[in-house]
Image (spheres, rainbow, N blue to C red):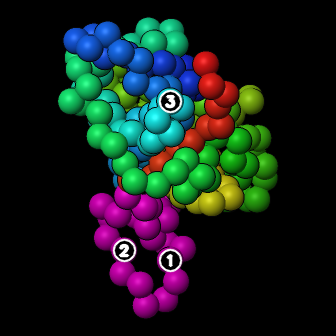
Amino acid sequence: MPKLTDIIGSRVISVYNGKYEGYVTAAAADAGYKKITALRIADEETETIKRLLVRDIFSLNTGIILIRNTSKIIVEAGTESELPASLINKTVLDLDGKTLGLVKDVNLNENYSALSISTETEAVELDKVISFGENFLLINNTDKKISAGRFKPDGIKVNNAQEAKPDNRVVSIETKTP
């Protein structure tokens, strides 16, 4: 089972062009952090930030991601410093206010769908996550069904599909150039 930290820092190489495209610095996920949708790639040679959709990955092995050709890479405007805060190393709290540790990794399946979030001591299933934000990841460790909509401010409508979770959450981990 791949982990997000296994992907971050990997070198991206085009098979057709035989060219090093950069290294992975972050991963973008869909709403609710259910599936990794894209990877951000830093190209230290041209100092550009690029995006690679995970569906365009040809193969992934330890430290190497192969893509078919460079047409699969999208050049983005902006810099790495504009990325939102990382999910990794966020404090995990339950609804009693008990600290359960820090997020250490995201466990993925072969289709890059998130299965669970790992702390130093346990794996938290995604259906237990109520919300994650700038500072904390909050979980429901009871048998009761609790949604983020229960905690919304007055006057804001939240439907079940949104659950007050942002779309395209970007997770980043600081890396060193390989």
Q: Is residue 80 within the magenta segment? A: no
- Quarter of the image holding residue 8? top right
Q: Quadrant of the C terminus?
A: top right
Q: Are marks 2 and 1 in contact (CB under 8 Å)?
A: yes
Residue range of the region highlighted in magenta in the rendering = 146-167
Q: Residue at x 65, y 37 (%)?
A: 174
Gap in angstroms between the C-alphas marked 2 and 1: 8 Å
The residue at which mark 1 appears reads as 152
Depth check: 96 or 4 in front? 4
Q: Position of residue 175 (x, y in %)?
A: 64, 31
**What residue is shown at x 73% (from left), y 59% (from top)?**
96
Amino acid type assigned to the residue bearing label 2 in the image = Val
**9 lies above or below 19:** below
Q: Residues within 10 Å of mark 2 (few under 14, many from 20)?
A: some
Q: Main secondary structure of the magenta part?
A: loop
The residue under the point 40% across, 54% down is 77
Indicate the amino acid at tag 3: Glu
Residue 98 vs residue 61: left or right?
right
Residue 1, position in %: x, y?
Answer: 46, 15
Q: Which of the marked residues, 1 or 3, is nearer the chain's N terminus?
A: 3
* 126 shown above or below 118: below
Query: Where 11 sits versus 55, above or below?
Result: above
Instruction: Give, as a three-letter code, the residue at label 1.
Output: Lys
